[in-house]
Amino acid sequence: MGLASFQDYEVVEVILTYALARKDVKPLAKKLLQTFGSFRGLLEAPAEELKKIKGVSDHTALLFKLIKEASDRYLGERVLASPDIIASPRDLLNYCHSKMGWLKDEQFRLVYLNTRNQVIRDEVLQEGTVDQTVVYPRKVLERAIQLKATALIMVHNHPSGSVLPSLEDKALTRTLIQAAQNLQIKIHDHLIIGRDDHFSFLENNLL
């Protein structure tokens, strides 16, 4: 069944038929999209919030969570399998948005690359409360050496919504670049992920 031409509520209808067979699910599909704002918002909604909607059972909520998890894993494998991640920045951004764009707390992750710009490892380095994630440059570079990485991409999210870098973000980036140069490790980019937007230090000539 081709879904490319379907509207969002029609895709949700198809999903709901697997949980609510032989029922008219169009009203529920539209209610879910109205409540959570978009298809993405629906998939990112916690199961507890989904079950507050009349007609959404434990089984239905689990189905949406499984679809979200499957989507995340697909995007992750696509990024990790890329022959050159720098040549496919959109895939990386989509992956980062799926993993971080919906988080309520700040998270700092690192994508470690080899000489061919292939992904060696994608790791969460630090997590914290809103705007309070602490990152230690030495820890970043020690891990890069352990993995024999020659380059890396820094990624963190701004749960507050604005993706503009703070003074601390800029200072951390400068410190890491200077320290990495001494070890012949290149910083390809520092991405800040918001719910619907992103900021690239590379694109804004801040590297």
Image (tube, helix red, strand yellow):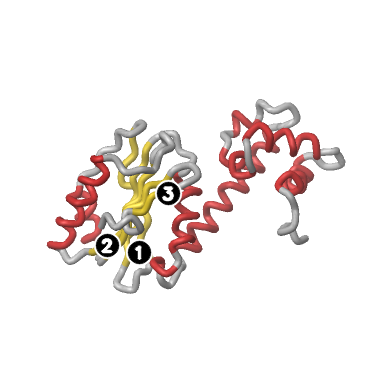
Image coordinates for residue 130, horizontal then vertical, percent: 36, 32
Residue type at mark 2: give it. Leu
Label 2 crowd (10 A; few <14 / some 14-19 / many >=20): some
Residue type at mark 3: give it. His
Quadrant of res 202: bottom left
SS at circle 2: loop
Looking at the image, which residue is at 17% across and 50% down?
Answer: 175
- Quarter of the image that includes the C terminus: bottom left
Q: Are marks 2 and 1 in contact (CB under 8 Å)?
A: yes
Q: Is residue 60 above or below residue 15?
A: above
Separation of residues labelled 1 and 3 (CA atoms): 23 Å
Q: Residue furthest front?
A: 204
Q: Is residue 73 above or below residue 186?
A: above
- Quarter of the image that includes the N terminus: bottom right
- In the image, 56: left or right of 25? left
Q: Earlier in the sequence, mark 2 or mark 1?
A: 1
Image coordinates for residue 87, horizontal then vertical, percent: 42, 69
Image coordinates for residue 110, horizontal then vertical, percent: 33, 53
Q: Are marks 3 and 2 in contact (CB under 8 Å)?
A: no
Looking at the image, which residue is at 34% across and 73% down?
Answer: 116
Res. 155 in view: yes
Q: Which residue is mark 3?
A: 198
Q: Which residue is mark 2?
A: 147
Residue type at mark 1: give it. Ile
Res. 18 in view: no
Q: Which residue is mark 1?
A: 120
Quadrant of res 135: top left
